[in-house]
Amino acid sequence: MFRFKQFTIHQNRTAMKVCTDSCVLGAYADLGLAGRLLDIGTGTGLLTLMAAQRNPTARIDAVETDEEAVLQAIENVTNSPYSERVRVIKGRIQTFSAEPYTRIVSNPPFYTNHLRSPNQAVNRALHNDELPFEELIASVVRLLNPDGQFWVLLPPFEMNRLSIVAEQAGLRPFRQLNLRHHALKPVFRTIVGFVFDAPANPETDELAIFEADGKTYTESFHHLLQPFYLNF
């Protein structure tokens, strides 16, 4: 169980637990003007609930294929202050149909050729067999409002692969965050916002989670997560 200031994430049923990089995505992505928001692969419902806290008027759909994760997300949403504005849906995004969204957010599976776990739920959460980047982008293009934004979190190599697929489909990056454990460590996650009509050079931000000691949170990280973390 992971307690935030305004909601609690139970995670005993799901393969993927609350992680820092997902929290950064939920806090950093431009979700403030979302009238309708879609969370692809919601898992525990973390990004959905962070979005609901940040935007008090958004209507949010959270789509997930794994039965246990769906039940977990429903539990977390039901026990939150935002249950009337959130709908958790079991299904594949490839066949999901709805009116266009002003914002789409996703922390998708990205492994392709790595060793498999004996736990099939872990495989679904980590490996993109069931949601290849081509199918993810095709779904986003189909479901995103023409002036909407798609926000996604991936490791740098996989983000480069997805960006190529996205550009071929007409989506281009307009803002990027490079996330490091601390300033001397390499980038381990990248958050990118995509739109249909983007400038040639996207705005790029850098964020280190810790100071050089590897223990003290940086002021920037503290400021970004302050609305959510209990200890900030």
Image: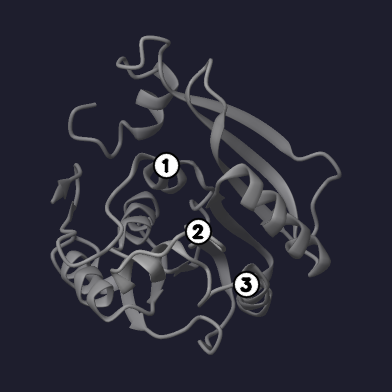
Q: Residues within 10 Å of mark 3 (few under 14, many from 20)?
A: many
> Which numbered disc covers residue 114?
2
Camera-side mark, 2 or 1: 2
| Residue position for label 1 | 21
Q: Residues within 10 Å of mark 2 (few under 14, many from 20)?
A: few
Could you tell me the amino acid type at mark 2?
His
| Residue position for label 3 | 140
List x then y, in percent, for residue 212. 42, 10
Q: Is residue 31 left or right of residue 100?
A: left
Q: Can I make out residue 177 in this image?
A: yes
Q: Secondary structure at mark 2?
A: loop
Question: Looking at the image, which residue sits at the far right?
Answer: 200
User: Rounded to the nearest whole Å, what is the CA distance between mark 3 and mark 2?
Assistant: 26 Å
Evaluate if marks 3 and 1 touch, with contact meaning CB atoms under 8 Å apart. Answer: no
List x then y, in percent, for residue 153. 53, 50
Q: Is residue 14 left or right of residue 153?
A: left
> Which numbered disc covers residue 12?
none
Q: Quadrant of the C terminus?
A: top left
Q: Nearer the viewer, residue 178 or 122?
A: 122
Q: Residue at x 57, y 66 (%)?
A: 102
User: Rounded to the nearest whole Å, what is the CA distance between mark 2 and mark 1?
Assistant: 21 Å
Evaluate if marks 3 and 2 touch, with contact meaning CB atoms under 8 Å apart. Answer: no
Above or below, 1 against 218 in this view is: below
First along the sequence among labels 3 and 2: 2
- The quadrant in which residue 136 appears is bottom right
